[in-house]
């Protein structure tokens, strides 16, 4: 959890229900709220002129998104879209800044979050510079394992579709499918009923 929900509500935050496919904020919009997901899943994306998506992140409950313009007064650099019916909590920007001023511990935790997201941006740039599809996927899997994100650790199932993976690593879906099959042959992942399972997390960490 980024910011305690009770703290957000105490400063006047409200809940908002979303339907699948609904846009929460668009690239180029001015930031008016702090957003934090309560239920469901969102994707944080850029869309090119041909309609292809570059997925920067898949947002899960307890995570925030679109933080940069809250601090630099610039515009959103990506678009947030509901991947499924979802619920978020939002707090108007002036009240969010007041919350951070009043709660230094929360402010510090939020600053740490921004640093982690900046590191992930560097990881994405490094990953996209690599021409090997398997290496791109392994790099992403390693990050997801280390940050306990988008993986069901009870069953090792990857909670991302092949299309989402393709959007995150900058490859065509067909290329991702081939790369995953190659990783399956190396016994790093397995595929059951169309779902990808990361069988050998130790190998991925040390890959």
Image: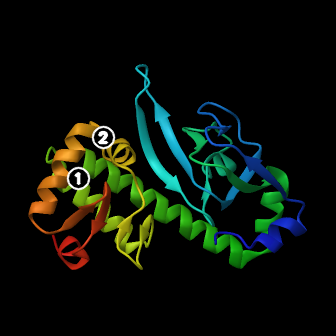
Q: Quadrant of residue 53?
A: top left
Query: What color scheme is it?
Result: rainbow
| Disc 1, SS | helix
Residue 78: percent from the left, percent from the top?
A: 54, 38
Q: Nearer the viewer, residue 90 or 106?
A: 90
Q: Nearer the viewer, residue 19 or 123?
A: 19
With 140 as the anchor, is 150 left or right in this view? right
- Residue at 71 percent of width and 41 percent of height: 31
With 189 as the anchor, is 55 left or right in this view? right
The mark nearer the N terminus, 2 or 1, is 1
Q: Which mark is residue 136?
A: 1
Check the image and report above or below for 71 versus 3.
Answer: above
Inspect this view and state whether residue 154 appears.
yes
Q: Nearer the viewer, residue 2 or 61?
A: 61
> Crowdedness of circle 1 by 10 Å Cα count: few (<14), some, many (20+)?
many
- Residue at 67 percent of width and 32 percent of height: 29
Residue 100: percent from the left, percent from the top?
A: 76, 67
Q: Which mark is residue 170?
A: 2
| Disc 2, SS | loop
Q: How far is mark 2 from mark 1, CA to CA?
A: 9 Å
> Crowdedness of circle 2 by 10 Å Cα count: few (<14), some, many (20+)?
many
With 98 as the anchor, is 159 left or right in this view? left
Residue 169: percent from the left, percent from the top?
A: 31, 46
Marks 2 & 1, CB-CB < 8 Å contact = yes
């Amino acid at each position: 959890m980024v910011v305690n929900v009770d703290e957000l509500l105490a400063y006047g935050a409200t809940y908002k229900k979303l339907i699948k496919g609904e846009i929460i904020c668009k690239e180029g919009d001015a930031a008016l709220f702090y957003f934090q997901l309560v239920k469901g899943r969102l994707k944080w994306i850029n869309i090119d002129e041909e309609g292809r998506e570059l997925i920067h992140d898949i947002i899960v409950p307890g995570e925030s998104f679109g933080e940069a313009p809250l601090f630099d007064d610039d515009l959103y650099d990506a678009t947030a879209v509901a991947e499924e019916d979802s619920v978020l909590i939002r707090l108007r920007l002036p009240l969010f800044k007041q919350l951070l001023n009043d709660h230094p511990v929360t402010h510090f935790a939020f600053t740490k979050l921004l640093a982690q997201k900046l590191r992930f941006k560097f990881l994405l740039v490094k990953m996209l510079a690599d021409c090997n599809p398997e290496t791109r996927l392994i790099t992403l899997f390693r990050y997801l394992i280390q940050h306990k994100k988008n993986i069901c650790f009870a069953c090792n199932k990857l909670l991302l579709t092949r299309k989402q993976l393709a959007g995150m690593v900058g490859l065509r879906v067909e290329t991702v499918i081939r790369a995953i099959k190659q990783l399956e042959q190396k016994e790093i992942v397995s595929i059951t009923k169309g779902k990808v399972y990361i069988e050998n997390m130790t190998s991925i960490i040390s890959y």
